[in-house]
Image (tube, helix red, strand yellow):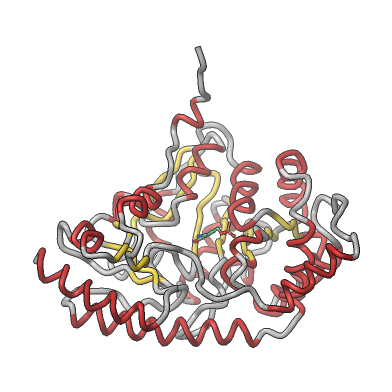
């Protein structure tokens, strides 16, 4: 008889997929974490050229091509205002693999991983796959990650804590003061801070800050081309951190992946070194949509902390709201898909056109009225 590993039996398919399957084909989908912009032409072109030139036939170095790692180090170093050594970068199969490497290389069986609740669905699953125990840490009432709650949850069994700003599913952005606290906690308690920054370019009010600015040894940063350049399908991300941590993560990456896809690496290099106006355009579009969504939700009587980044809003919603929306043709995701403390909320993704959002907000108001 087939038997399965205890690790895999502890995880299940994400609740988000189930929601999509329940909806009709013509539903407006505000459930996806998928940008609705095309990948920039210069990125696609670079991949096509590399394929035609035969440059993509072989494995690249395990960490990725030198040119890509230089491009990542330069862009990230510039964005965060800290020097990044290209040798301290591993190109991965999306931010997802980067998160996997970070936890796999640092978490021992039974060790605790503190994760934001509500938080991105992969944190809980990847902590379990690494043999660890995810410990959900509730957010503040305004849905920001609370450093005091993280510090309180640390025990002698804590290996790591995960922070994510701008946040999925909340759209909230950590203040500089909070980010400095994440860095201090990582240093003083000597635990790893995994900082998931895949939405970093999409901050509307204030600036994106990273704990890596304030602590180098105990912080690893996960990032990706996925949201930044609308390249989710290319599967190209990266992890940055101290050399000894990179070396350990490389051991895992080498065996599970060998190297990130070569065509995707050429496309990513072009995206990172080419014109960044496309990123500004996306950010401006998300900001306009954010304003539309916030005012629509408030007209619908739904309370929602103003999202300051990414492309999500997470209002408080009455019981039955999510089912009512789906029945009326708008897909949103129930907050509990992101953790126990997500209950009573719904995640609305505004990576959809303004016309779709306007139509959806009308339906959302009707759904809210029907269940209030
Ligand atoms: N982190 C967060 C917070 C995300 O929302 C996502 C994707 N939805 C990822 C990481 C993974 O991104 P990728 O597609 O690059 O694997």
The reply to whether residue 237 is in sight is no
Q: Residue at x 39, y 61 (%)?
A: 148
Q: Where is residue 30 in the image (x, y as percent from the top left)?
A: 36, 67
- Residue closest to the far front: 25
**From what the image shows, is residue 246 above or below residue 73?**
above
**From what the image shows, is residue 282 above or below residue 237?**
below
Q: Residue at x 38, y 83 (%)?
A: 354
Please tell me in which quadrant of the rendered image residue 301 appears. Answer: bottom left
Q: Which residue is drawn at 64% across and 53% down?
A: 98
Q: Position of residue 362 (x, y in %)?
A: 22, 78
Q: Position of residue 81 (x, y in %)?
A: 68, 79
**From what the image shows, is residue 140 above or below residue 74?**
above
The reply to whether residue 83 is in sight is yes
Q: How many marks?
A: 0
Q: Which residue is drawn at 58% across and 40% down?
A: 107
Query: Position of 143 compared to 72: left or right?
Result: left
Please tell me in which quadrant of the rendered image residue 320 appears. Answer: bottom left
Q: Which of 21 and 371 is in front in this view?
A: 21
Please tell me in which quadrant of the rendered image residue 264 appears. Answer: bottom right
Name the quarter where the C terminus is drawn. Answer: bottom left
Q: Where is residue 342 in the image (x, y as percent from the top left)?
A: 30, 56
Q: Quadrant of ligand 1?
A: bottom right
Q: Which of 173 and 201 is in front in this view?
A: 201
Q: Nearer the viewer, residue 312 or 206?
A: 312
């Amino acid at each position: 008889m087939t038997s399965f590993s205890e690790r895999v039996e502890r995880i299940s398919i994400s609740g988000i997929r189930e929601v999509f399957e329940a909806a009709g084909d013509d539903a407006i989908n505000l459930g996806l974490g998928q940008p609705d912009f095309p990948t920039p032409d210069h990125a696609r072109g670079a991949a096509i050229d590399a394929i035609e030139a035969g440059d993509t036939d072989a494995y690249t170095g395990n960490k990725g091509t030198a040119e890509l790692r230089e491009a990542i180090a330069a862009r990230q170093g510039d964005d965060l205002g800290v020097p990044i050594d290209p040798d301290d970068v591993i190109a991965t199969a999306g931010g997802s693999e980067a998160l996997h490497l970070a936890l796999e290389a640092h978490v021992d069986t039974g060790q605790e991983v503190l994760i934001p609740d509500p938080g991105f669905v992969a944190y809980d699953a990847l902590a379990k796959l690494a043999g660890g125990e995810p410990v959900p840490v509730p957010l503040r009432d305004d849905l920001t990650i609370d450093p005091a709650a993280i510090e309180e949850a640390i025990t002698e069994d804590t290996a790591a804590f995960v922070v994510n700003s701008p946040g999925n599913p909340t759209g909230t952005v950590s203040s500089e003061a909070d980010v400095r606290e994440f860095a201090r906690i990582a240093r003083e308690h000597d635990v790893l801070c995994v900082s998931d920054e895949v939405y970093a370019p999409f901050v509307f009010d204030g600036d994106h800050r990273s704990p890596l600015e304030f602590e180098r040894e105990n912080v690893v940063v996960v990032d990706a081309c996925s949201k930044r350049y609308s390249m989710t399908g290319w599967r190209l991300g990266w992890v940055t951190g101290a050399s000894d941590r990179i070396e350990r993560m490389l051991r895992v990456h080498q065996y599970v992946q060998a190297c990130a896809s070569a065509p995707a690496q050429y496309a990513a290099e072009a995206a990172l070194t080419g014109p960044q106006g496309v990123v500004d355009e996306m950010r401006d579009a998300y900001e306009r949509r954010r304003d539309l969504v916030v005012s629509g939700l408030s007209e619908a009587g739904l309370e929602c902390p103003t999202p300051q980044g990414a492309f999500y809003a997470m209002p408080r919603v009455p019981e039955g709201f999510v089912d009512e929306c789906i029945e009326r043709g708008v897909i949103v995701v129930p907050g509990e898909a992101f953790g126990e403390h997500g209950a009573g909320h719904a995640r609305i993704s505004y990576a959809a056109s303004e016309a779709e959002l306007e139509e959806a907000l009308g339906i959302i108001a009707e759904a809210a009225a029907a269940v209030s």
